[in-house]
Amino acid sequence: MNYPKLTNAANIQENDLIVIAARPGIGKTGFALNILNQLSNNYKCLYFTMEMTDQQLYRRLVAINSNVPMLEHDKLQTEHTEDLIKAQQLKVASEKISKKKIEIVTGGQTIRTIRSKIVKESREEHLIVFIDYIGLIRDTEKNRSNYERVTDITKELRQISLDYNC
């Protein structure tokens, strides 16, 4: 990862379940996408998102890889030399991302659908899984508190990481 201090301090190993938690708007998705961007050079990465479209996530990945802020993507004017350079950076970044081993799964998920996808994808090669975010995974049981639901989902995800080495 591109976070040497974090890498050394965290001592992340295979089968670890890492939860990134903070209040809204802090940058959890951006942080996760930066990690995904780095790891997808060597590993197949599966990114479940219940909040964003795949297009939104790919735009963010292009921004990460091109160093061109997302706000500038649609404002580039090809008659300006600086904008031509940025447009080329976006093209190169898009091509780079297309060669990475990234699959984005959007929409509502249950622990069962997540497990099924991981089982299918982990047969081929080692898999790194990102879930954005645990609190939006649909529950199949009714009348449980949010705490109970998220606790059970986290336990299930931990078991999946152990069972499928992801």
Image (cartoon, helix red, strand yellow):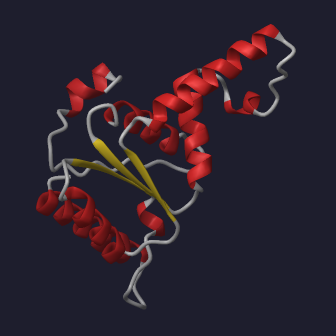
Left or right? Give the position of 116 relative to 22.
left
Identify the residue at image location x=67%, y=26%. Answer: 69
Residue 52 vertical placement versus 40 (above, below): below
Left or right? Give the position of 162 relative to 91.
left
The quarter in which the N terminus is drawn is top left
How many numbered discs sit on the rendered protein? 0
Question: Residue 78, located in which quarter of the rendered image?
Answer: top right
Question: Residue 101, located in which quarter of the rendered image?
Answer: top left
Q: Nearer the viewer, residue 165 or 76?
A: 76
Q: Could you tell me residue 57's position as x and y percent?
A: 56, 46
Identify the residue at image location x=73%, y=31%. Answer: 73
Identify the residue at image location x=14%, y=53%. Answer: 165
Residue 123 vertical placement versus 114 (above, below): above
Question: Residue 153, located in which quarter of the rendered image?
Answer: bottom left
Q: Could you tell me residue 152's position as x and y percent?
A: 28, 73
- Looking at the image, the residue that sits furthest to the top is 81
Residue 161 vertical placement versus 155 (above, below): above
Residue 46 vertical placement versus 111 (above, below): above
Identify the residue at image location x=15%, y=40%. Answer: 13
Q: Nearer the viewer, residue 113 or 157?
A: 113
Q: Could you tell me residue 43's position as x and y percent?
A: 26, 39
Left or right? Give the position of 64 relative to 115.
right
Q: Nearer the viewer, residue 13 or 44?
A: 44
Q: Nearer the viewer, residue 25 or 52?
A: 52
- Looking at the image, the residue that sits furthest to the bottom is 142
